[in-house]
Image (spheres, helix red, strand yellow):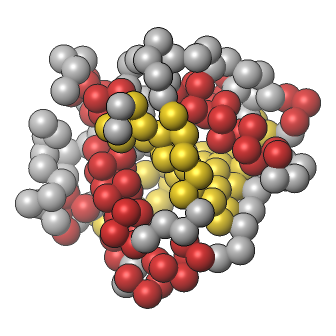
């Protein structure tokens, strides 16, 4: 893991005894005319594969490897059947980025939304994020979206909101929620502090 990575989590609050986790969610949208392509091709060779029929096992691996550090957990709660139905739904697409076979990250689309987007920790800070975001936006518009929507929250990468705004996304609303803290639900999986 890169030396600077632990600093990425300084903004995440420590687990509370009540198991609640306060989160501020920001919802954003992007019109084609507002898109600013920012991503330069990475210094290393990254391929992106559209996985047309993802298995539940593959999806769970991607979701865990990219999202665990950012405390993603909602899709862990889905049964295999419910997750399989979601992955097979019309308008769903999964795109996986790899470097020499190693997982770099992925993006997931559902209709006009970038549902999930992220990199594994080994590839953060290597200028891949803006480039991969451009690929996600490009694909969403190529599918016919008149606007692209996404959301980010206060637990995500500390520069996530800034990155989306620099790409041209505009905040449309925000809300604060109290979620279950996965570090309390699954302490053996979501170790604190992250290592």
Residue placed furthest toward the front = 100
Please state if 133 lies on the left or on the right of 73 as rendered: right
Q: Quadrant of the N terminus?
A: top left
Please state if 78 lies on the left or on the right of 34 as rendered: left
Q: Is residue 128 above or below residue 85?
A: above
**Percent position of residue 186, x then y:** 16, 65
Taking depth in this image into account, of 101 and 32 the one nearest to the observer is 101
- Regarding residue 182, the answer to whether it shows in the image is yes
Residue at 35% x, 31% y is 100
Taking depth in this image into account, of 139 and 68 the one nearest to the observer is 139
Please state if 119 lies on the left or on the right of 170 as rendered: left
Q: Is residue 146 above or below residue 40?
A: below
Residue at 19% x, 45% y is 14
Please state if 39 lies on the left or on the right of 21 as rendered: right
**Percent position of residue 47, x then y:** 51, 34
Q: Is residue 81 above or below residue 51?
A: below
**Percent position of residue 101, x then y:** 35, 38
């Amino acid at each position: 893991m890169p030396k600077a990575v632990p600093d990425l989590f300084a903004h995440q609050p420590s687990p509370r005894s009540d198991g609640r986790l306060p989160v501020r969610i920001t919802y954003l949208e992007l019109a084609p005319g507002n898109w600013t392509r920012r991503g330069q091709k990475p210094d290393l060779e990254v391929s992106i594969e559209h996985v047309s029929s993802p298995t539940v096992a593959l999806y769970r691996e991607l979701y865990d490897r990219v999202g665990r550090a950012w405390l993603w957990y909602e899709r862990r709660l889905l049964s295999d059947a419910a997750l399989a139905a979601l992955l097979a739904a019309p308008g769903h697409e999964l795109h996986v980025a790899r470097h020499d076979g190693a997982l770099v990250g992925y993006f997931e689309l559902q209709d006009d939304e970038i549902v999930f987007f992220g990199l594994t920790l080994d590839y953060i800070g290597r200028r891949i994020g803006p480039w991969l975001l451009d690929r996600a936006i490009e694909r969403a518009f190529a599918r016919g979206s008149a606007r692209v929507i996404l959301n980010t929250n206060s637990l995500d990468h500390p520069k996530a909101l800034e990155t989306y705004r620099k790409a041209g996304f505009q905040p449309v609303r925000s809300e604060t929620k109290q979620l279950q803290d996965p570090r309390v639900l699954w302490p053996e999986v979501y170790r604190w502090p992250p290592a």
